Image (tube, helix red, strand yellow):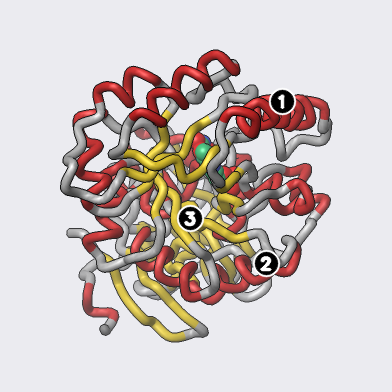
Amino acid sequence: MSIEAFYRDSWVEVDLSSIEYNINQLKQRLRPDTKIFAVVKANAYGHGDEQVAECALRAGAKGLAVSLLDEALKLRDAGIEAPILVMGWIRPGDAHVAAERDISVTVFQADWVKNARLSPSAKPLKIHMKWDTGMGRIGIRTTDEMDELLSMIHKNKLMELEAVFTHFATADEEDYAYYEEQQKRFDHLFSHFKRVWSRNVEIHTGNSAASMRFPDHMKHFVRFGISMYGLYPSGVVKKERPIDLKPAFSLQSRLIHVKKVPANESISYGATYQTESEEWIGTVPLGYADGWIRKLQGMEVLVGGKRHPIVGRICMDQFMVRLDQEYPVGTMVTLIGKQEHQSISMDEVADYLETINYEIPCMISYRVPRMFVDHGNIVEIDNPL
Ligand code: PMH
């Protein structure tokens, strides 16, 4: 595939060799019997779900985790046959769709089991029972709820309990106390579970933070999200650096217009920016409809290996940058990534927006084509437009 697969000068580059590297780093940190499930929900945190899923499976991931049934179906439609878990709630009326496509689903309500629409001719629906040990989002919280749910599952011949799992709320924090409290609650629920359920199930608890920091606490598999993409889940974990990571995502564009503007001229909507003296102003073809939101006004971008500030309001499809000199039209603009000795990390953008790195690649919209690179070669371009 060639670069002509899209017709604009802005794109995301996703380095699949970094994803492979990050999975291998975690593999070396985990016990040999702990498997990795690649978390590819939300279009693989904005990176491109099918391509990341295939790369992760090639690199040794044993399964995939998504949030929505639609996300799981998209991966099945792409020909992926590996185990897929939907970690969010699906409608009981849609249970048969998951069963037909061999997609495992998350269950935590007795009523859900009662109302699940399943066909006796299909293979049994694989379910993962969610335990809420302190995240407070979804899952059963007590042994009574567990007993009720297990007896419903036991009676239902169209379902098969494949795994039990929980999710940590603070595994990336300095203070371990709440993480340990969640572990304790999990152990309490599990000792009850073992007494009442004789069949074998798998157990999974850890996200990136827990799996990198506490590999010996991990069970049959971990759900590896943010750090598969080369990002640390928090500043604390970044400082600890339990494994080395390579960011996979960069955001690139090119100058499409460069002009010399006299002093006291205004730039962009609202005329909020005035040139102080004669200034070189460049226009970059990326805006808030691409996910480069208006709050990023003032953030820097790289041009010619140097940092330059975004000036004036960010428009829907374009923004302006104050340049230190004239640059030719077509000069590369790096919004996230490296240029010569300078780099702008996802964490820097997240800090500027007072948010977490997870949010940044997710917010770069479908309008920006994803270019997949493997060991320096372009292997695929995904442009939904
Ligand atoms: N498991 C569950 C149930 C999750 O919700 C997530 C991420 C992960 C694993 C992966 O976590 P990681 O990316 O830290 O490795 N979920 C979310 C979320 O709901 N909001 O931000 C991240």
Q: Residue at x 33, y 65 (%)?
A: 81
User: First in sequence: mark 1 or mark 2?
Assistant: 2
Dot 3: few (<14), some (14–19), or many (≥20) neighbours within 10 Å? some
Mark 1, ligand 1, within 8 Å: the answer is: no
Query: What separation in Å lies between label 3 and label 1 (alpha carbons)?
Result: 66 Å
Q: Which residue is mark 2?
A: 27
Q: Which residue is mark 3?
A: 279
Kind of element beneath mark 2: helix
- Image spot of residue 298 (x, y percent): 53, 42
User: First in sequence: mark 3 or mark 2?
Assistant: 2
Residue 368, placed above or below residue 124 = below
Query: What separation in Å lies between label 1 and label 2 (alpha carbons)?
Result: 28 Å
One can see residue 29 in this view: yes
Q: Which mark is residue 188?
A: 1
- Image spot of residue 247 (x, y percent): 59, 63
Q: Are marks 1 and 2 in contact (CB under 8 Å)?
A: no
Dot 1: few (<14), some (14–19), or many (≥20) neighbours within 10 Å? some
Relative placement, left or right, of 29 versus 120 is: right
Query: What separation in Å lies between label 3 and label 2 (alpha carbons)?
Result: 51 Å
User: First in sequence: mark 3 or mark 1?
Assistant: 1
